[in-house]
Image (cartoon, rainbow, N blue to C red):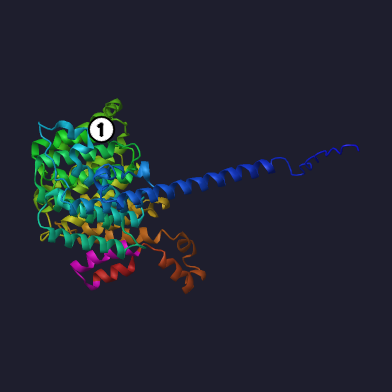
Amino acid sequence: MPTRVTVPRSSPPNLNLPGVSLTSHHQEEADGRRTMELEVRQLCSSTLQSLADSPRMANVLWPGLLLQLSPAAHGPALPLLLQTSVGVVKRMQEEGRLPLARRCGKANRGCRSSPKSTLPQELLARLLMLGASSFMTVQVRRAAMFLLFELMSMFQAGSGRFWNNYKTEMLLYVEDHKTCFCQREWEQQLLQFLEDLLFFISDHTWLGCFIASIRRQLAYGDKRPGDKSFLYKCWGTVMMFFPAESIKPQLWLLVEMVDFREEEEREGFARALGLCARQQLDEIFAILEHWEEFVSRVQLQPSAGGSLEEPASIEQLRSLLLLTYGHVVHSGPTDLILETIGFNILAPMRQHYFLSPHDPLVRSAFLRSLALVGEAVTQVSRIPLVSQDTYTVLSPLLEMLRGKDRARLQSPDHQHALLAISYIGKFEPRLSKEQEAETIGTCIASAMIQRPALAKLRGTEVAKSSALRAESLQELPWEGLDLVLQTFLEQHLTRTTLLHLFLV
């Protein structure tokens, strides 16, 4: 009987369009990789959790686990790392094995290169950074601050009850602002916490190690300008407690790490000097004088800016100098600055502004700085004699508002100009009635010009439409203008003043 041979059927021809099967194959590969990554993460998570739950493993995980709290290296894993770290710290506390801060003087030079040699300072810098970073979720920020307060015993910083109250208030703030988190307010709370903590520590050796830890954080290449800006402010807070002779050497070490081309970094650096000025005013004024000379050299010889790691333009350096003047007055001891504010602050600000009056960076820094100065000096008990002529301080702002550049008038610069005028109008000597009338008229005109449709339709029947007028009025910058009007009406509310106001 003949043997039957089975011939395998050939596969049906591929009727798909070219590239479709290839795309499907790539999609399957990508899905497979994602599935594998998820499984690996779950495995690592459960393994780490098991290790943390083991009574004998806390000593193995300490302190290496906490030193892995780096957004660049382990960003997605930060919630798990923080949660596990809290468990490890609590177990170390229960067993009485949580180390205290080490000294790092001449006998311990390792603090400058090794995070483990100054563990408390290193953890303080890292956790403050995680708590402040706007790129972290609110949950990560809260976990970082919770862990920081669990480590308070390491810092030898006084009463536990005081810090428990601090912990409650700060964590409640995070909980209450989950959906409307204000970065500026939160940073201010963190800096105030740091200032109080360093006041209790008050040890120059400890602070020196903490400064080294801040510089290590700045040296990491993954830092965003906003994060670096916060670290500069931490540096300025630490410098309040340093001996005066150490300020300049520490400042030049910091300058090497600042990218002056970034606006956020310039702002943070200026605020750092302002914070430092609270206790080191004479040193900061000397630094400002030196900085003025440096900027002048760069203007005359641009290659002089090459002494910075990242050369900045003359306008960027000048805007930094202007911002620093404002922050020194705003964050520093304003009452001590008042006697010489015209000579030491306002005159140099005007000088540097008029060297580059049309540059947007310089103009913006000048306006913001004047607003900072004005806010600070009007909050003290007495109004300063700022110069022989208040109108001289005010006149550059009025010139800006008279400009026809609508883009400029619709920018934040316009609001900063109005805000600054509302403060400067309270300075002594008072403006004359004619100068007040000019100021009010210029401010109102600059606000109205932001609605060009209103000017084009003025005098026509359409302009009388209540709907159009209501829409136009809603879009005007009323907040800044309102402050200006309050300033002058509070000084002498008369029928003449009101009549002039309505006739403008």
Q: Which residue range is magenta in the image?
A: 478-495
Q: Is residue 396 visible?
A: no
The answer to which of 344 and 428 lies nearer the viewer is 344
Give the total of numbered labels.
1
**Residue 285: image location, x then y, percent:** 13, 41
SS for dot 1: loop
Q: Quadrant of the N terminus?
A: top right
Which residue is label 1 attached to? 256
Hey, which quadrant is residue 324 in on the image? top left
Predominant SS of the magenta segment = helix
**Residue 257: image location, x then y, percent:** 27, 35
**Residue 85: image location, x then y, percent:** 28, 50
The answer to which of 115 and 248 lies nearer the viewer is 115
Q: Which residue is drawn at 21% across and 54% down?
A: 150
Q: Is 334 placed left or right of 477 in the picture? A: left
Q: Is 292 situated above or below 434? A: above
Q: Residue at x 11, y 41 (%)?
A: 242
Q: Is residue 491 magenta?
A: yes
Q: Does the magenta stretch include residue 311?
A: no
Hey, which quadrant is residue 115 in on the image? top left
Q: What residue type is labelled 1?
A: Glu
Q: Can residue 7 be seen in this view?
A: yes
- Identify the residue at the far front of this view: 1
**Residue 484: image location, x then y, percent:** 27, 62
The answer to which of 347 and 125 lies nearer the viewer is 125
Q: In which quarter of the image is the C terminus?
A: bottom left
The answer to which of 416 and 58 lies nearer the viewer is 58
